[in-house]
Amino acid sequence: IDEQGRFYVAETYRQGKGVEDNRSHMNWLHDDLAAETIADRLAYFRKHLKDKVSDYALEHDRIRLVEDRDGDGIADHASVFADGFNNIEDGTGAGVLARGGYVYYTCIPHVWKLSDTANEGKATLREKLSSGYGIRVAFRGHDLHGLQLGPDGRLYFSIGDRGYNVTTKEGKHLFRPDTGAVFRCNLDGTELEEFAYGLRNPQELAFDNYGNLFTGDNNSDSGDKARWVYVVEGGDTGWRMYYQYLSDRGPFNREKIWHPAHAGQPAYMVPPIVNLADGPSGLTHYPGVGLSDRYKDHFFLADFRGTPSQSGIRSFAVQPKGASFELTDSHEFIWQILATDLDFGYDGSLYVSDWVNGWSGLGKGRIYEFTDPEHAKAARAAHSAELMKQGFSERSTEELTQLLAHVDQRIRMEAQFALVDQNALDALQQVALTSQDQFARLHAIWGIGQLGRKTSSAVAGIQSLLHDSDSEVQSQAAKVIGEAGFTA
């Protein structure tokens, strides 16, 4: 959903027509397990399919733009924003994020940055930010996805266990052929790095109000259970693609890697917080408007089980427990819908994409709007939709510093990023050091951290926060000072 309330929907037509699944092609399994590059995958496609390999270029994935042009709350216009993603090696195009006039799109083997320079509802410029994802086939749906803007101003995204062999713009080699991971980079694709790995299929990512990153990771259909994971920088959560082809899933089951923390668990891995859901798919964090106070800092997770009667949306929160978290208030929020994804609109409504039925789909889908009428007025009073439509680049430093305390997490982030664009270090420091609002202080610290990545001395003025009475302020200050590489 972009700042104007328009929807960008990833549509796939390549399932079973280029986007394959090893379970349907066991004759090439050994070749798939041996593949270490996109070229390797293409080579064994050609070896096994011969002339029929050209069929894999017939269908394409695309982005559809859906709009409510007359403002009556019902979409009345749909068009193709971008298509032509039909190379033999392409797909699934599974992640899309619209922000600041750009649309970011993850479609194996590339991360794309698209823009509509003519303002006609169609991408006219396309840039590959990075390439080399999805060197193996693995299972269908284990794709490149999870696009999320982090509070550090960087683009985060995830891949399932199809592996990757990526050379960054700076020449760094990122190579893991046998697992899924989370990455981050600047919005221009620079400084790409592997953030965490050892995941099987982390479909979506979400940050809480304190900058902690979480994902739901699917199970391997061997008696194991899906995992709710705290994504720790540099962390390995233990899955390897090879385990899928062992009848008992090898160490994943034998060493109870998928279990929450317990005695005897391998010491190299970060255990999940809890086992939750059966088919974790779309994920979002409550931004702060549209629902009751019960849902402050709650997550909403689509649990996709192949049939609507057993599927729906779960809601829950987490609270600190030692170095990790524990689950609280877990319940079925909306049930009996085969939801694939969900996002809160700037109007406070929750929008849900519906696969309708089955594992393969019916070739059609729906988007539903869910609104809490008791809290719709409060959502309108927050003016999130109005603020987003107007933008932040022309707002004064004074107004932006006030918006750092806004009830809506997304508004706070945009105000932070606008202050960074203004290079408003003094204003950010003032908020970080003196504000009575915790969220305002955290966003100010993160903004200073963004400036500190460019000039390390920018973080010098917040060293006193290492001794602040608020432990969250302490930890975030330590984080950005350390990342800036600043030494007094």
Image: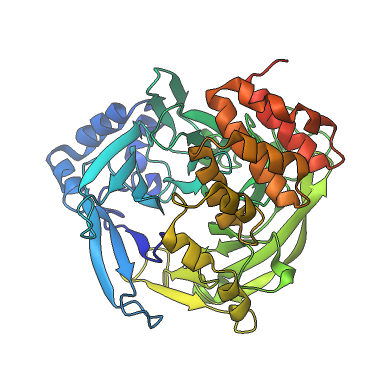
Whole-percent x, y for residue 338 in the image: 49, 70
Residue 277 placement (x, y as % from top left): 63, 60
Front residue of 274/376: it is 376
Query: Which quarter of the figure is the N terminus placed in?
Result: bottom left
Q: Can I make out residue 272 in this image?
A: no
Q: Going 30% across and 36% down the picture, which residue do you hit?
A: 128
Q: Is residue 252 above or below residue 341?
A: above
Foreground pick, 235 / 105:
105
Q: Residue 393: give x, y in percent of width and height.
A: 44, 49
Question: Would you say 308 lies left or right of 188 here?
Answer: right
Image coordinates for residue 59, horizontal then vertical, percent: 20, 54
Q: Which residue is drawn at 48% across and 42% down?
A: 157
In the depicted structure, whether residue 334 falls above or below residue 246:
below
* Residue located farthest toward the left when viewing the structure as drawn: 51
Asked which quadrant contains residue 312, the reply is bottom right
> Please, is residue 191 above or below residue 183 in the view?
above
Q: Residue 381 appears in which quarter of the rendering? A: bottom right
**Residue at the location (37% across, 79% down)?**
71
73 horizontally vs 269: left or right: left
249 is higher (above) or lower (below) than 279: above
In front here: 281 or 438? 438
**Which residue is located at x 23 percent, y 57 percent?**
119
The answer to whether one can see residue 193 in this image is yes
Which coloring applies here? Answer: rainbow
- Quadrant holding the C terminus: top right
